[in-house]
């Protein structure tokens, strides 16, 4: 009754080869997960800057409505800045990181002429604004197009697939 059914002298455990194989698989899996996390962090950063751009535009529209006066802002396409133009001073509302930039969307009218480096944006006390369209160029080669609608005062943001970059 007290006898072992299996060979009691055999050693229990893993061989060195099995341990190395498991460690190498864990290493490969961690490399892929780190790369995936890095891409995800980049997309989150792009989303954050697109959101901040849209929020800055909404703040300008709200400022015009609440103050009862026309609010003028300038979008500097070269430097990636949005700033409020007042009577005395210039107030920077948004400064993009170097990997992001603004641009005018390509059109047939500007194909032969040099694109402008600045775009003026006007917001009116009744909640409307001047029509404007510009792109936020993302580091991942994506585009977010912002369209400021004249009569409704709506600020639309869309993803654009553009090959003319």
Image (spheres, rainbow, N blue to C red):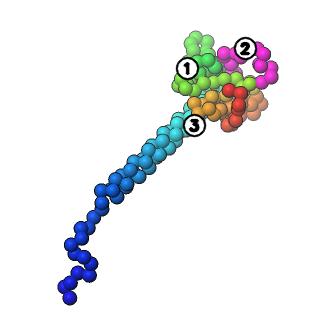
Left or right: where does residue 37 sit relative to residue 165?
left
- Snapshot quadrant of residue 10: bottom left
Residue 133 x %, y %: 72, 27
**C-alpha span from label 1 to label 3:** 21 Å
Of badges 3 and 2, the one in the foreground is 2
The dominant secondary structure in magenta is loop
Q: Residue at x 33, y 56 (%)?
A: 17
Q: Which residue is mark 3?
A: 47
Q: Which residues are magenta?
A: 107-125
Q: Which residue is mark 2?
A: 114
Judge by depth and name the residue closer to the eye, 80 or 17: 17
Judge by depth and name the residue closer to the eye, 33 or 46: 33
Residue 67 x %, y %: 63, 24
**SS for callout 1:** strand
Residue 114, magenta (yes or no): yes
Q: Which residue is mark 1?
A: 92
Earlier sequence position, callout 1 versus callout 3 = 3
Earlier sequence position, callout 1 versus callout 2 = 1
Residue 111 in view: yes
Residue 41 x %, y %: 50, 39
| Quarter of the image with the C terminus in it | top right
**SS for callout 3:** helix
Of badges 1 and 2, the one in the foreground is 2
Judge by depth and name the residue closer to the eye, 125 or 11: 11
**C-alpha span from label 3 to label 2:** 30 Å
Q: Are marks 3 and 2 in contact (CB under 8 Å)?
A: no
């Amino acid at each position: 009754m007290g006898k072992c059914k299996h060979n009691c002298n055999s050693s229990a455990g893993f061989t060195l080869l099995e341990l190395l194989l498991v460690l190498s698989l864990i290493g490969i899996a961690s490399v892929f997960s780190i790369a995936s996390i890095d891409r995800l962090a980049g997309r989150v950063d792009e989303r954050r800057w697109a959101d901040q751009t849209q929020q800055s535009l909404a703040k300008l529209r709200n400022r015009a409505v609440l103050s009862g006066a026309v609010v003028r802002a300038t979008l500097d396409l070269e430097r990636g800045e949005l700033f409020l133009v007042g009577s005395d001073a210039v107030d920077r509302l948004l400064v993009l990181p170097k990997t992001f930039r603004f641009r005018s969307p390509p059109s047939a009218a500007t194909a032969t002429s040099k694109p402008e480096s600045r775009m003026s944006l006007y917001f009116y006390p009744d909640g409307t604004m001047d029509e404007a369209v510009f792109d936020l160029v993302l580091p991942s080669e994506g585009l977010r197009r912002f369209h400021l609608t004249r009569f409704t005062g709506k600020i639309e943001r869309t993803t654009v697939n553009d090959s003319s970059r």
